[in-house]
Image (tube, helix red, strand yellow):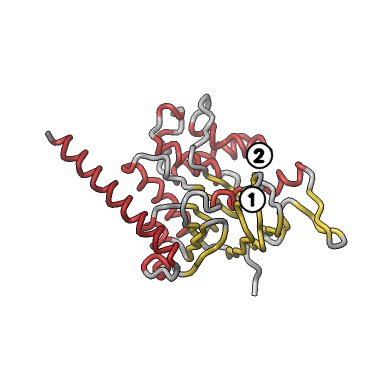
């Protein structure tokens, strides 16, 4: 049996007196798409940030591709790695945030080229060629010379995905990548993510998009209160949840989706007048 690409064991994290993660155990195999579901404050984003070492864990361990994240073990004790080695580990993980975090003074292509040039030290010609290929992959080849202010939110998020892919990561983390978008722009970002999944990219996705989770994820993990409540096949968990907390959360999401649909329909009717 090959080891999982991500192996998290008994991961805990607290901010002050608030225990956000209370012993999380999650494995993600290479090529697998796992969606993390749950209400705000359940620890999903914190867990992603711990994988990418944007937060340090208080307990437990996380391995990525067989390497202990952020630490090395000597004589049964953990020792924090130097920042340079942590940065080296982080280079292997792409992360897409709720907000796009693009450099406003750089074009779409320059945003995609920045990290491979500065961090990987690759030649400008190779990086530019690869950058254009990635922008084409996310449907933005013709926008390569546009600045973020000239792009819609959906287009900016697709540039952010291309930027993360430019580092050739082993793993992609998505933290509610569509939550800051207008409803009509969500689909274009989910389409890119769906294509990445089909191409075999290992992905952990925090999302409230149940349709995406149901049809794209290999597994969903429902978190609440800093623990994993239940996990399994997306259709089984979403259509037939076993725990009351999962049922309550999914009912609320369906209600919100119905409200969004009604609002869009009302807007469309108003625009006809």
Q: Which mark is residue 229?
A: none
Question: Outermost residue, left direction?
Answer: 273
Give the residue drawn at x 58%, y 63%: 28
Question: Outermost residue, front direction?
Answer: 17
Relative to 251, does residue 123 appear above or below in the rendering?
above
Quarter of the image with the C terminus in it: top left
In terms of secondary structure, where does tag 2 sit?
Answer: loop
Give the residue drawn at x 69%, y 59%: 63
Q: Where is residue 209 in the image (x, y as percent from the top left)?
A: 39, 53
Quarter of the image with the N terminus in it: bottom right
Q: Where is residue 5 in the image (x, y as percent from the top left)?
A: 63, 62
Q: Camera-side residue: 106 or 46?
A: 46
Q: Camera-side residue: 19 or 135?
A: 19
Residue 93 falls left or right of residue 79: left
Residue 149 falls left or right of residue 80: left
Q: Are marks 1 and 2 in contact (CB under 8 Å)?
A: no
Residue 206 visible in the snapshot? yes
Q: Position of residue 212 (x, y in %)?
A: 39, 57
Q: Where is residue 184 in the image (x, y as percent from the top left)?
A: 31, 42
- Image quarter for residue 6? bottom right
Q: Which residue is denoted by mark 2 in the rendering? A: 122
Residue 91 visible in the snapshot? no
Q: In front of the other: label 1 or label 2?
A: 1
Residue 66 falls left or right of residue 248: right
Q: Camera-side residue: 15 or 44?
A: 15
Q: Which residue is denoted by mark 1 in the rendering? A: 50
Give the residue drawn at x 35%, y 42%: 185
Find the distance from the CA under tag 1 to the CA under tag 2: 28 Å
In terms of secondary structure, where does tag 1 sit?
Answer: helix
């Amino acid at each position: 049996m090959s080891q999982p690409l991500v192996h998290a064991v008994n991961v805990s994290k607290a901010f002050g007196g608030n225990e956000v993660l209370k012993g999380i155990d999650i494995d993600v195999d290479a090529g697998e798409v796992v969606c993390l579901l749950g209400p705000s404050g359940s620890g999903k984003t914190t867990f992603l940030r711990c994988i990418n070492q944007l937060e340090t864990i208080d307990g437990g361990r996380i391995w990525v591709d067989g390497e202990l994240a952020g630490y090395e073990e000597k004589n049964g004790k953990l020792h924090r790695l130097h920042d340079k080695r942590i940065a080296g580990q982080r280079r292997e993980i792409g992360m897409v945030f709720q907000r796009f975090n693009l450099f406003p003074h750089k074009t779409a292509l320059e945003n995609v080229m920045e990290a491979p040039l500065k961090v990987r030290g690759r030649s400008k010609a190779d990086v530019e060629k690869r950058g254009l290929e990635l922008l084409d992959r996310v449907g933005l080849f013709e926008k390569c010379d546009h600045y973020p202010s000239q792009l819609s939110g959906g287009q900016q998020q697709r540039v952010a995905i291309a930027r993360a892919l430019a580092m050739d990561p082993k793993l992609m983390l998505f933290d509610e990548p569509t939550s800051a978008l207008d409803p009509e722009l969500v689909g274009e970002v989910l389409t890119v993510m769906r294509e990445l999944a089909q191409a075999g990219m290992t992905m952990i996705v925090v999302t409230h998009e149940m349709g995406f989770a149901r049809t794209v994820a290999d597994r969903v993990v429902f978190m609440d209160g800093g623990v994993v409540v239940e996990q399994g096949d997306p259709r089984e968990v979403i259509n037939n949840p076993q725990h009351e907390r999962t049922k309550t959360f999914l009912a609320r999401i369906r209600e919100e989706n119905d409200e969004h649909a009604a609002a869009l329909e009302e807007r469309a009717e108003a625009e006809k007048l």
